[in-house]
Image (cartoon, helix red, strand yellow):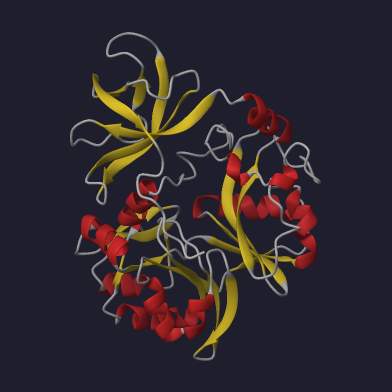
């Protein structure tokens, strides 16, 4: 892993017994000695601290809101100060280039993009918008779980007044924190951008609290899977439209047909047409029978024998909170919602039932 980048908190992860793996060009802790199952359940019950500093942090001028709307099917101009919104960079063919978070702050727009796509995304932004600034001197942490507010409030008491998708810039020990009440686990919590030179101190203060444990990439993936949240590169990509991904909610009303600023984003014709007439595929929840998970790439069929492939598992694993294997897949939209399916694992077709999403209901402070 010598050619991989290291995060500002790499030494802390090593000290905590983190097991490192390559991920999106970085050396990342996939788990700690407690293991993925324990880390997952701890986050659901108390509070988990995730290092997501590999993700891209980007600043845009406030007056770039209209230009940004040319790249996303999101109401950026109507986004109020100190609020954040989920967005998608769409492709000319109606697929998805990446998903991201967009926040309007007092003096700028703050974006968080996926690590695997940040070079692409920043180049994409710079090709259409002036004044794009990548933030390279800050770490990004996520504190997630039902006791996240209790823990975070010891350091920043003001977070107790924050609601889901609020953002604030506030002082902590002489440094400015950029905090959003959001995350990608299906739990209440915060994402905190902190100057890299004080990130270790800040993280250690949180980890000293009884509620808080370090959580690696493994549990982050199982948590978001239980919450029915798509992972870019698997459940979302340049060939999957937002409608196929069952994410029509991410197309804001003002950008839909009949809206005040209808369309105007890449792939709008296909995406808006699919919203009205239906998409050829749909993302579904899946519950494999038995205890063996079905992983991404497993082909799906409508018959136990014969017939053509009707879809594929896009994400899959064991759901510790559910206590059973779970998965998400993309299937032909002509398949009835109650039809039994079969996943082909090592040449053998195994039954899998369609299921509603999410598997674990998110709990946010609204």
Which residue occupies 78% across, 60% down?
64
Q: Is residue 131 left or right of residue 346?
A: right
**Up-down relation of residue 302 to residue 176 (above or below):** above
Query: What residue is drawn where x is 48% and y is 82%?
Result: 197
Quadrant location of residue 241? Answer: top right
Q: Residue 297: in sight, yes or no? A: yes
Find residue 214 and report its horizontal and vertical position in percent.
Answer: 30, 69
> 262 left or right of 249?
right
| Res. 3 visible in picture | no
Image x and y of residue 77, in percent: 76, 58
Left or right for 93, reference 100: right
Query: In which image quadrant can residue 36 be found?
Result: bottom left
- The quadrant in which the N terminus is found is bottom left
Residue sitting nearer the eye, 10 or 207: 207
User: Residue lying farthest top?
Assistant: 306
Work out whether 258 lies above or below 354. Answer: below
Q: Position of residue 111 (x, y in %)?
A: 62, 61
Is 6 located above or below residue 264 in the figure?
A: below
Where residue 35 appears, x then y in whole percent? Answer: 21, 59
Q: Is residue 75 left or right of residue 307?
A: right
Q: Quarter of the image holding residue 271?
A: top right
Look at 52% across and 25% down and name the residue there. 281
Looking at this rendering, what residue extends furthest in the bottom direction? Answer: 174
């Amino acid at each position: 892993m010598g050619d991989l980048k290291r995060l500002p908190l790499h030494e802390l992860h090593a000290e905590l017994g983190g097991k490192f793996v390559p991920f999106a060009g970085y050396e990342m802790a996939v788990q700690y000695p407690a293991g993925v199952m324990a880390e997952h359940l701890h986050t659901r019950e108390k509070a988990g601290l995730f290092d997501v500093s590999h993700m891209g942090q980007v600043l845009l001028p406030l007056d770039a809101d209209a230009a940004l709307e040319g790249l996303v099917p999101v109401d950026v101009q109507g986004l109020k100060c100190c609020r954040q919104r989920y967005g998608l960079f769409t492709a000319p063919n109606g697929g998805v280039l990446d998903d991201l978070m967009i926040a309007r702050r007092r003096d700028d727009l703050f974006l968080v993009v996926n690590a695997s796509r940040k070079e692409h995304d920043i180049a994409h932004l710079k090709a259409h918008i002036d004044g794009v600034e990548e933030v390279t001197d800050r770490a990004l942490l996520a504190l997630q779980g039902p006791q996240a507010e209790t823990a975070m409030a010891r350091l920043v008491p003001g977070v107790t007044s924050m609601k889901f998708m609020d953002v604030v810039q506030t002082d902590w020990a002489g440094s400015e924190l950029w905090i959003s009440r959001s995350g990608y686990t299906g739990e209440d919590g915060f994402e905190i951008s902190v100057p890299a030179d004080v990130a270790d101190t800040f993280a250690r203060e949180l980890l000293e609290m009884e509620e808080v444990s370090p959580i690696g990439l493994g549990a982050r993936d199982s948590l978001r899977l239980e919450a029915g949240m798509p992972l870019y590169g698997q459940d979302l990509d340049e060939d999957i439209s937002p409608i196929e991904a069952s994410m029509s909610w991410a197309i804001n009303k003002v950008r839909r047909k009949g809206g005040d600023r209808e369309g105007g984003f890449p792939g709008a014709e296909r995406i808006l047409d699919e919203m009205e007439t239906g998409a050829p595929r749909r993302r579904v929840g899946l519950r494999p029978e038995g205890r063996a998970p079905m992983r991404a790439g497993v082909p799906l069929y409508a018959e136990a024998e014969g017939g053509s492939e009707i879809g594929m598992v896009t994400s899959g694993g064991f759901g510790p909170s559910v206590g059973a294997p779970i998965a998400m897949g993309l299937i032909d939209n002509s398949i009835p919602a109650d039809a039994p399916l079969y996943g082909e694992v090592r040449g053998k077709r195994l039954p899998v039932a369609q299921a509603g999403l999410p598997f674990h209901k998110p709990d946010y402070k609204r």
